[in-house]
Image (cartoon, rainbow, N blue to C red):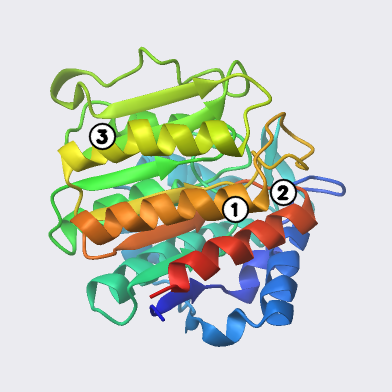
Amino acid sequence: MAHTGFVYHPDYLNHEMGLHHPESPERLRAILARLKASGSMSQLVRLEPTPPDHEWIASWITKVHTSAYLKDLRRVSPQEGQVALDPDTSISSGSLNAACLAVAGALAAADAIMQGRVQNAFCAVRPPGHHAESSHAMGFCLFNNVAIAARYLQEHHGLERIAIVDWDVHHGNGTQRTFYEDASVFFFSTHQYPYYPGTGKAHETGAGRGSGYTKNVPLPAGMGDTEYLQIFNTVLRPALKAYRPEAIIVSAGFDAHRDDPLAGMNLTTEGYVALTRVVKEIAGEFCQGRVLSCLEGGYNLEALAASVDGHLRVLMEA
């Protein structure tokens, strides 16, 4: 059985965006309950991030986000209640610490993988990150956890080529923009289109030195296991075979599930298992099995928890 890391911190539950908001602490509670009930939790290597040093974590956050944005978040962070940052995203008194810990969790997973303590890892973090732009919050996201982790793997651990696979039902606009002119990160995304946030057209393939290193596969509503698996086998596999990444980061949104209330796709839990297996096989061939997976979306609690459990069971396979 592969050594699989699991990142979690109870302070992730302190990020609150208001009553009935779909991105709620209940998402993580559901995941934890499922992993304990299924027995998966006992087989995972726990990677609990320590409270981050403010200067250290800021130095990595500002590899992707502006210093002004970080200062603005500190300035508007409330003592109580919520402050709206955009129509979908707000922060509470515990949000900024949770967001910093989410970044710290992704970096802790990167360290554990690169040091050989685990082969791969899943980060059960919140808030999610792939919509966050360099200078503003967006779409439930404050800091772009996967983008920061990619920069950390490059600048702290010396990797040269990172692949980011984003299977969230929404396009990872923030991640794409971060690396759009950068050949050192290959960004691949499947997403419902047209849909929020409106980016991710097929002709968006990178620019300048990054031309050809962004691959978007926009999909109409209703696509399910068969269509997704065909794309991963016929588009993702050859793309990454040509790119030969040294690590793969997954923006693991589970909101393309057929039971998710915020989208219109038809993936099943078994479909996510199959997609995970494809990514793991590619990682085994090209990057010593290094897979760093970070939670993004997924808003039906039962479907989310079951899909994360299936995702982890594949990562744990020898």
- Rounded to the nearest whole Å, what is the CA distance between mark 1 and mark 2? 8 Å
Which residue carries the number 3 mark? 239
Name the outermost residue toward the top.
203
The amino acid type, in three-letter code, at marker 2 is Glu
Q: Nearer the viewer, residue 121 or 280?
A: 280
Task: Tell me the element at label 2.
Answer: loop
The amino acid type, in three-letter code, at marker 1 is Pro
The amino acid type, in three-letter code, at marker 3 is Ala
Which residue carries the number 1 mark? 127
Side of 28 relative to 115 (left or right): right
Q: Residue 97 has which mark?
A: none
The mark closer to the camera, 2 or 3, is 3
Residue shown at the point (51%, 42%) measured from the top left = 72
Residue shown at the point (48%, 31%) measured from the top left = 190
- List x then y, in percent, for residue 30: 75, 66
Disc with the residue nearer the chain's start (1 vs 2)? 2
Q: Residue 23 has which mark?
A: 2
